[in-house]
Image: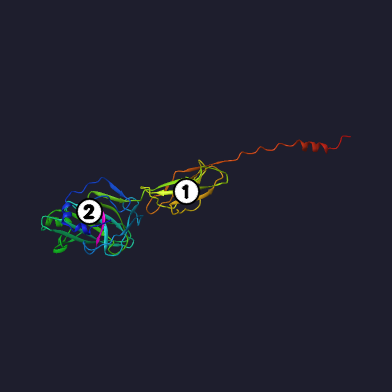
Amino acid sequence: MRSTLSVVATAALLTALGTAPAQADGPRTLTGPVTGDPDVFLTFVGCANLFAPAAAPQSRINLGPYDAPLGRRSLGLVPASPGTASGPFARFDSLASFDSTLAVAATSGSQGVSYVMSITPSNPPGTAWSGRAAVSASPGAWTEVSSAALAYDWTLVDLTTLTVVSSAGTATTAAFAAEHGDGAGFGVTGFGCDGQSFNLDAVRASGSTFDFEGVALSTGASVDRPRAEAGERVTISGRVTDGTGRVTGDPLVLESRPPGGAWSQVGPAVASDRSGLARVDVPVSETTEFRWHRPESQYADEGWSDPVTVTVEQPATAPAPAESDQSEKSDKSEAPAPQ
């Protein structure tokens, strides 16, 4: 996440914001707070004033709260302290048609703020119009917030000193543009002003839609030896990695089956060691396939490794001993002699 404090304090950036935002087709899936988009990104700003000091929140992908508006997961944000609002920054080339929407959920509710800054034909050189509106989300469900639907308190700001020059009343972005002229700029809508954690999803701005989803993980399995004698123990190891190859250390559950049979769980979940490996020693009495199950987590869907096989060669069956002729002779010798 970026801080816009140093960004919005310069007229040069506001001029650059006149470039039309890029258009995107369909939702873009994110697995964290970084969008990779210069027109829309997550940031944090002061709640009382756009230029006030602000602290970066912690972020994590998780399930809930409630059913996410897009997909199954959303981006959870935990403010460092009250007084900072976190949410999407969006560029626009037309104040009159600007709209940025996001869905927010908080089990305890959340207070936030929305800012808009724009340069229009009516503001003097070296100044910009700044609008501020308080926003809130009630507990119990997702709330969609639209910047175009908000009534902002507008002021004229000196971009050199960041001080208020004059006030310009309350109006929506479209109504303000109709009175003061259209222009380029940016908007920021964020929550967390009360210090309560919250979740964001379905961010739509500057022609893009962002859906926060889980991380793609891969699970691998290996065995210390592929062949064993009946009754011997073998070591099955498992490793979970993300898309970059980084070992994540997720807990794993071992499963086994005879070839062609049904999978069954072998013991409880296994935590990884310091190297990120999960290991289990198991006895084998017959040829067996093993695989690791990675249970669903807050930040990733469940998955399985490819199976590994341990081949057990059964000892050859010894032939049954032949009957002894001695017993027959013994029986005959003991029979009474004919009279």
In the rendered image, residue 45 lying in the magenta stretch gets the answer yes
Tag 2 secondary structure: strand
In the rendered image, residue 286, in percent from the top left (x then y), is placed at 55, 43
Q: Quadrant of the C terminus?
A: top right
Is 255 on the left-hand or right-hand side of 327? left
Residue at far front of view: 275
How many numbered discs? 2
Residue at image x 34%, y 53%? 73
Pick the front one: 165 or 63: 165
CA gap between label 1 and label 2 equals 46 Å
Is 164 on the left-hand or right-hand side of 281? left
Residue at image x 48%, y 49%? 254
Which disc number belongs to residue 90? Answer: 2
- Tell us which disc is closer to us: 1 or 2: 1
Query: Looking at the image, is 271 positioned above or below residue 321?
Result: below
Amino acid type at mark 1? Ser
Start and end of the magenta stretch?
40-46
Choose top left, top right, bottom left or bottom right for residue 271. Answer: bottom left
In the rendered image, residue 273 lying in the magenta stretch gets the answer no
Amino acid type at mark 2? Ala
Residue at image x 51%, y 48%? 235
Query: Looking at the image, is 336 positioned above or below residue 26?
Result: above
Residue underneath mark 1: 237
Looking at marks 1 and 2 on the same chain, the residue that comes earlier in the sequence is marked by 2
Which disc number belongs to residue 227? Answer: none
Q: Quadrant of the N terminus?
A: bottom left
Tag 1 secondary structure: strand
Pick the front one: 43 or 95: 43
Is 43 on the left-hand or right-hand side of 293? left
